[in-house]
Image (spheres, grey):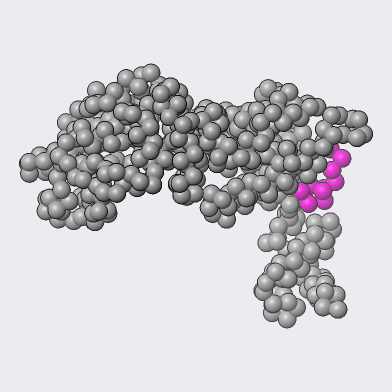
Amino acid sequence: MRFPFDQDVKKIGEIFRENGFSLYLVGGAVRDFLLKSKIHDLDFATDAKTDDVKRMFRHTIDTGIKHGTVTILFRKKGYEVTTFRIDGKYNDNRHPESVEFVSSLEEDLKRRDFTINALAASVPDGKIIDLVGGKKDLKRKIIRAIGKAEERFSEDALRIMRAARFSSKLAFDIDGETFSAMKRLAQNITSVSKERVKEEFYALIAGKDPVKGLEAMRESGLLAILFPELKETIGVYQGGVHKYDVYTHLLLTLSYAVKNEHPFEVRMAALFHDVGKPETRREDTKGEREYTFYSHDKVSAAIFSQIARRLKTSNEEREKVAHLIENHMFSYDSSWTDSAVRRFLKRVGKENLNDLIDLRIDDEDAITGGRGDRSNLLALIERINEEEEKGLAITLKDLAINGNDLKNEDIVPCGPEMGRILSLLLDEVIEMPSLNRREYLIRRAKELASRDSQ
């Protein structure tokens, strides 16, 4: 089996060869090709030094000269090429003290993390080269460190997290010796930047089998170190309709999000939607059930927000998932009035509705073993569609006035107060759609602003 390079890459390889150098595709692209998976980035390695590469090609970018990386611009495309290298001594579990450029592909491959990521394909002929047993481990579906696992993890502690991530991405098991080293060195993950941890964790959640990756984190000790809030859900008995503890329920909800092919934000919300239950669990003094978990939805959203800030996620990423978690406990029945349906839609937002429904489906499936009753959710969606077809005001943009009107009428300047008044006006219009008239809303806005100033 040979890697199917296109004509442009073959031409680049020929240029290297004509100048006395070799060129190889390395890493994930070769692995994914052998797995018949979608190939993303192409990374190349060569025995040529950066000056040699820049001499061979007219247009290049100094992407990372210190680490031997140059981007070749060839026929309107960019190709990143790195000189073979070995890393010097690691003192901080993250960065080598020095980098030494070498002429041996074997030395370069042996410095990498796992055998399945150290496969290469020669350019231009596409011949697959395996010097560390990566093809065998692909067949065995095993994540195994190259050489001595402790040495690989000591070089870069993020590799401990990457092992769990690849376990999720590929649904592979982790080799026994590699896993033992993960457990012994798990504490070293604290030396890694939160941004790098976040990148690996999000990739884990987006993988083929995130539950496998999370369980690898739990058994290795990574979960307790990085996400103690999730660790605290283990063994927390719920009672009632729940057969499992909170932790198992969270994993089941996530697994159904994967099975139901729901988007990434729903997967993340599924994992954390009940993380506040340990904090809110109380014995039920009324005797209706063993425990209550009042406000666990709000507490769970707050805990997730803390975790997201710790991982330095963007505000948009954090707020979207936290909003789904905070609103996941809605319960619809046919007694809802039309205005109640509109209030619900205003609260959750049209843009979040599908994801929230998905989360509720996954939650119910986790409780019922995939036999959740969707009839109420379908009825709610039908009611929402009916309200939207009426063309009534549900969001701020549906109001007969906007912020510019309030500003032009000298009612209130831009800022939080303007938003608050518009929201109050929308509440009134949702209850009584006939009030959505410019004259009334301007008058009412003046009343609200005047009342607040007294």
Residue drawn at x 29%, y 23% is: 133
Residue drawn at x 85%, y 75% is: 451
Vertical relation: 116 (above or below) 275: above
Q: Position of residue 320 (x, y in %)?
A: 61, 49
* Residue found at the far bottom of this picture: 410
* 301 left or right, relative to 137: right
Quadrant in which residue 129 is drawn: top left
Assign the C terminus to one quadrant of the image.
bottom right
Quadrant in which residue 453 is drawn: bottom right
Say whether residue 425 is visible: yes
Assign the N terminus to one quadrant of the image.
top left
Q: Position of residue 253 (x, y in %)?
A: 64, 31
Vertical relation: 185 (above or below) 196: above
Q: Position of residue 218 (x, y in %)?
A: 56, 31
Read off the magenta span.
330-344
What is the number of callouts on the image? 0
Q: Position of residue 411 (x, y in %)?
A: 75, 78
Residue drawn at x 69%, y 44% is: 300
* 378 left or right, relative to 52: right
Residue toward you, 208 or 429: 208
Quadrant in which residue 442 is drawn: bottom right
Say whether residue 357 is visible: no
Residue 339 colored in magenta in the image: yes
Residue 104 colored in magenta in the image: no
Residue drawn at x 7%, y 44% is: 19
